[in-house]
Image (tube, rainbow, N blue to C red):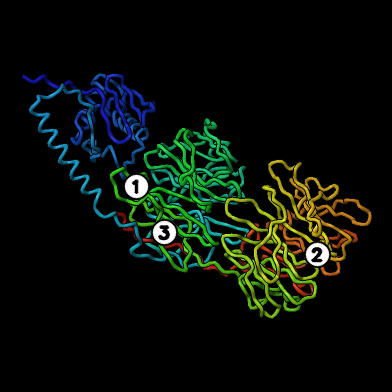
């Protein structure tokens, strides 16, 4: 006679274990605190999975007739706490379904860890036959043709306003995003089915939308003029309407809400976790570089993030407690990868990869089982002239939202008589222009691929000198016009200074150092080349290096510690440089061998792309004044600074340069040159076919 099975004391569903004897709820082996009444409700639901437990039964079991409580309020509160512990949603339940005015039902599959005794030998034999049959079927499935890759079967343009967009999040019915010009941004929204965009009033000065809560009832917002500043504050705002409120004293460069509702944020290289409202923050992990753009797997067991190290963006992963931190794609050749998110079912992971200056969206099966024939290699979802960035799976996982953009700049010069900008060199999509001393040649960086080109001033004799994946910037003609020095960046490496012949060839590194080098500048006699030797982690090791063209010897420019970005004046009298970390200017008097401070008015917030006038009397630059970009010139003899152009009033959008900001320079006759951004950028919905 068979011995009856012993009733299990442990019940499993999803990533949760419930020990009924010890009254413990565990998620992925980690105990979750749950009060007595919510646990008793969970126990009753698990004892009768799939069946309705009426409100009257719950009242009789948990609140006897002689108990004086507000039953409805107490029951609703207990159910809410139970759902919070399980990460469940009343509107879209995975575990507990509400039956209006009747009760509740547990809808997820339940597995009891049964303790049956061994069955009779006869049943073993039949079980072995069944197992062998199943293995044969699985082997047949495994040996069949691989599953087809995921693909896009249709697409729809959702917006049509032409403004710059980034940071997509969704509450299921709407898409929220940051929409901006060069100096101002706002949070806007559009229906997931498309239509007109509308602003969202968040009542803070510099908002950036980061995430939506698991219940899709709140937006997570940061406030800072620079959205990647580690001092950005975090705010929560109810949707579809409500006022934002600050999440404690938390601050960092980015944040996300984990599936359990906790606030997780990055500050520099460190990760912190806090309560949903920002209370009780604590550091739980440190990455090997500056990190941002986190996302959690739907089960809450892992999180991934974008790591910036060695001038490359890479995707990394760690367990939810910060352990087992490692690259998502180990062994891959260096590539710029970022901004990844899981599909709601956790089966796929989408992310952005940039190669040769162009970004596209890739998708990969997340941890397929050993018998699956699904590919473990990422697949590019679309191929074409449209560049796709910021992938965001829809709430039902059937669509993928993304920003589609066609990047193009337009080179323009400032016409002082007409007080307007007009196309220059045919309005080519390029910047970083520099002209040979004899005025016959021009070198420039093409946008967006970052290749170095040279041509005559009329555009003839055009020759490409560098090729992707290398990106070029801050090129400078040698005084004899025979070669060009430039800053070059290869994937996974630091910025380096290179030399290349004007007739092409292989770029030659000036030094073999692994430290970042940028901003080359020739001495007027062509015998030496100065450049910044940069170590921003140890600013005392930053200085201006000098390369002797004849001997190839490297020396340190006198008194140049904590200085970089040298600019030799055309007459050889001065060297202008920037300081770190104060971001100020210093001027070296070459004949007198002395450094002097350059006084810039405090109203000017920073400066960029310093350019000497041909007569060495002025230095031109652009800067921000009262949140508006203006173009200035500095007179060297008395350090007088005067504004020349209200750029913000004349150029709506400026194209982002390779080294950051937007490039400015001087053409023949000291004509100011700029790059206007004429890219198109809209939100698209892509219909997915996922095997």
Relative to 415, say whether 543 is above or below. Answer: above
Q: Is residue 542 left or right of residue 558?
A: left
Farthest-out residue, right: 592
| Residue topped by disc 1 | 347
Residue at (49%, 55%) from the top-left corner? Answer: 353
Between discs 2 and 3, the one toward the N terminus: 3
- Nearer-the-camera pick, 545 or 220: 545
- Considering the numbered disc 3 on the image, is that residue within a helix, a strand or a loop? strand
Q: Quadrant of residue 489?
A: bottom right
Q: Quadrant of residue 138?
A: top left
Residue 5 placement (x, y as % from top left): 15, 22
Work out how far the residue at label 2 is from the one at label 1, CA to CA, in angstroms: 56 Å
Q: Is residue 615 left or right of residue 372?
A: right
Residue 652 placement (x, y as % from top left): 62, 67
Work out how far the residue at label 1 is from the one at label 3, CA to CA, in angstroms: 17 Å
Q: Is residue 25 left or right of residue 207?
A: left
Tag 2–tag 1 contact (CB < 8 Å)? no
Residue 563 placement (x, y as % from top left): 78, 49
Which mark is nearer the camera, 1 or 3? Answer: 3
Work out how far the residue at label 2 is from the one at label 3, CA to CA, in angstroms: 45 Å
Tag 2–tag 3 contact (CB < 8 Å)? no
| Residue topped by disc 3 | 380
- Nearer-the-camera pick, 84 or 662: 662
Residue at (64%, 76%) from the top-left corner? Answer: 462
- Checking the image for residue 612, the label placed there is 2
Whether residue 130 can be seen here: yes
């Amino acid at each position: 006679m068979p011995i009856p099975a012993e009733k299990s004391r442990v019940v499993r569903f999803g990533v949760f274990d419930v020990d009924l004897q010890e009254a413990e709820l565990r998620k992925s082996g980690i105990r979750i605190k749950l009060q007595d009444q919510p646990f008793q409700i969970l126990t009753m639901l698990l004892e009768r999975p799939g069946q309705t437990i009426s409100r009257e039964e719950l009242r009789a079991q948990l609140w006897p007739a002689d108990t004086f409580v507000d039953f409805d309020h107490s029951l609703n509160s207990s159910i809410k706490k139970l759902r919070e512990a399980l990460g469940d949603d009343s509107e879209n339940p995975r575990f507990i379904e509400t039956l209006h005015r009747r009760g509740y039902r547990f809808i997820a599959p339940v597995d009891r860890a049964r303790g049956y005794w061994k069955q009779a030998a006869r049943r073993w034999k039949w079980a072995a036959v069944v197992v062998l049959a199943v293995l044969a079927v699985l082997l047949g499935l495994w040996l069949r043709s691989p599953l087809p890759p995921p693909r896009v079967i249709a697409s729809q343009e959702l917006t049509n306003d032409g403004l710059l967009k980034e940071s997509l999040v969704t509450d299921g019915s709407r898409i929220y995003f940051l929409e901006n010009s060069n100096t101002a941004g706002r949070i806007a929204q559009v229906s997931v089915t498309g239509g007109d965009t509308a602003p969202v009033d968040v009542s803070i000065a510099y908002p950036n939308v980061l995430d939506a809560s698991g219940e899709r009832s709140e937006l997570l917002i940061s406030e800072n003029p620079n959205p990647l500043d580690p001092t950005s504050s975090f705010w929560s705002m109810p949707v579809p309407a409500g006022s934002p409120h600050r999440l404690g004293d938390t601050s960092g460069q980015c944040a996300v809400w984990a599936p359990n509702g906790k606030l997780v944020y990055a500050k520099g290289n460190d990760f912190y976790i806090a309560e949903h409202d920002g209370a009780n923050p604590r550091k739980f992990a440190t990455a090997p570089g500056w990190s941002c753009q986190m996302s959690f797997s739907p089960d809450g067991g892992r999180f991934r993030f974008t790591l910036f190290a060695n001038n490359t963006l890479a995707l990394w992963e760690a367990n939810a407690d910060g352990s087992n931190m490692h690259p998502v794609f180990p062994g891959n050749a260096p590539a710029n990868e970022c901004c990844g998110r899981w599909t709601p079912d956790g089966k796929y992971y989408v992310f952005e990869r940039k190669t040769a200056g162009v970004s596209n969206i890739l998708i990969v099966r997340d941890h397929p089982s050993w018998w699956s024939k699904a590919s473990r290699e990422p697949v590019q979802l679309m191929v074409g002239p449209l560049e796709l960035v910021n992938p965001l799976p829809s709430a039902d996982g059937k669509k993928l939202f993304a920003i589609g953009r066609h990047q193009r700049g337009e080179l323009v010069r400032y016409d002082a008589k007409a007080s307007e900008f007009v196309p220059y060199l045919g309005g080519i999509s390029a910047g970083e222009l520099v002209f040979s001393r004899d005025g016959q040649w021009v070198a420039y960086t093409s946008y967006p691929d970052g290749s170095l080109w040279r041509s005559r001033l009329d555009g003839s004799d055009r020759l490409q000198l560098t090729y992707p994946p290398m990106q070029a910037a801050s090129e400078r003609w040698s005084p004899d016009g025979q070669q060009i020095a430039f800053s070059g960046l290869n994937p996974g490496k630091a910025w380096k200074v290179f030399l290349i012949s004007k007739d092409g060839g292989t770029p030659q590194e000036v030094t073999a150092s692994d430290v970042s080098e940028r901003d080359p500048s020739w001495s007027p006699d062509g015998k030496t080349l100065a450049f910044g030797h940069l170590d921003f982690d140890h600013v005392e090791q930053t200085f201006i290096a000098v390369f002797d063209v004849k001997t190839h010897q490297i020396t340190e420019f006198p008194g140049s510690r904590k200085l970089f970005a040298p600019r030799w004046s055309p007459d050889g009298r001065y060297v202008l440089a920037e300081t770190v970390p104060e971001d100020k200017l210093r001027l070296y008097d070459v004949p007198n061998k002395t450094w002097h401070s350059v006084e810039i008015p405090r109203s000017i917030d920073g400066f960029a792309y310093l350019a000497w006038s041909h007569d060495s009397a002025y230095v031109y630059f652009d800067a921000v004044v009262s949140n508006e970009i203006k173009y200035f010139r500095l007179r060297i003899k008395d350090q007088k600074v005067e504004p020349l152009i209200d750029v913000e009033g004349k150029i709506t959008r400026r194209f982002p340069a390779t080294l950051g900001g937007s490039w400015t320079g001087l053409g023949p006759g000291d004509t100011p040159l700029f790059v206007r951004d004429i890219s198109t950028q809209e939100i698209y919905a892509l219909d997915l076919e996922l095997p």
